[in-house]
Image: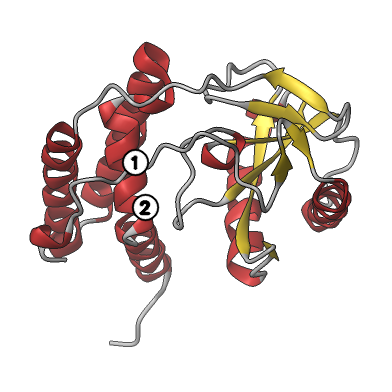
Amino acid sequence: MNLEEFTAQPFVHHDILNPLLWQDLQLLPDVRRKLLQIAEHFTKFLNVPDMQIEDITISGSNASFGYSEFSDVDLHLVVKDAAEQEELFNAKKNQYNSTYSITVHDIPVELYVQDSGQTHHSAGIYSLTKNRWIKQPNNQAPVASPQEIKRKARNYSGQINYALRSGDLAVAQHTMSELRRLRQAGLEQQGEHSVENLAFKLLRARGQIDKLRKYIDKLTSAELSLEEE
């Protein structure tokens, strides 16, 4: 990707929640029913015996005032002791999201499994199970400047491009882990409006994160394969 393609304003702020999903601060009934149906389908796809779902939530940009045309609906199964099977859940989640292209009012739905004991950092978190806010978003404009976000995104993109040229699985995996660590650190310190999170989301919207993920899958497949001499 040409770095000049980065927009200087990756974060948009609105005075209302996405009207395709919300009426004032209440989730539209048809949206809630459909998301619960999707969650049930995802649960069956996971096929994990004795999985204890404590809640089903949505979060991220479409549960706040910072949504854009690139924003997904982040749909989480909140599961007890999910961290004990993190690798399984991540693999199943990636498989599900790659297999099914699900939308609600033309907005893509992304599925996740979240450990119930893990703190989830988001401007807004809404419980579909209870049909109420767990964390109601504040209508506050972002504090990070577009220049800061663009600069950080350039840095991250450089790391990704290096990994994509490396041909080294360990390098690619380390790059992905480091990007996620930096994003998590930003979320913990400044929330969704942190420079790290907004830069990560910009790269994800531009397809860079998915490109790195697919590259890791490709290198992993090659490493596990036995080629004919």
Q: Quadrant of the N terminus?
A: bottom left
Give x and y (percent) for residue 144: 24, 26
- Residue at (67, 15) in percent of width and height: 117
Task: Give whichever of 36, 40 is nearer the camera.
Answer: 36
How far is the residue under mark 2 from the one under mark 1? 13 Å
Amino acid at circle 1: Phe
Q: Earlier in the sequence, mark 2 or mark 1?
A: 1
* Residue 201 quadrant: top left
Residue 96 vertical position relative to residue 24 in the rendered view, above or below: below
* Residue positioned 27% across, 40% down in the render: 199
Please provide percent x and percent y for residue 195: 26, 29
Q: Amino acid at mark 2?
A: Arg
- Circle 1 residue: 11
Write the residue at 63% across / 66% down: 106
Identify the residue at the far top of this view. 189
**Dot 2 corresponds to which residue?**
204
Would you identify the image quadrant in which residue 87 lies?
top right
In the rendered structure, the answer to whether residue 178 lies left or right of residue 33 reads: left
**The furthest residue to the bottom:** 229
Relative image position of residue 190 (x, y in whole percent): 36, 15
Q: How many marks?
A: 2
Tell me if residue 12 comes above or below residue 78 in the rendering. Answer: below
Q: Nearer the viewer, residue 178 or 27?
A: 27
Q: Return the residue nearer the eye: 52 or 148.
A: 148
Rendered image: mark on residue 142: none
Q: Secondary structure at mark 1?
A: loop
Residue 102 pos. (x, y %): 68, 65
Q: Is residue 101 above or below residue 180?
A: below
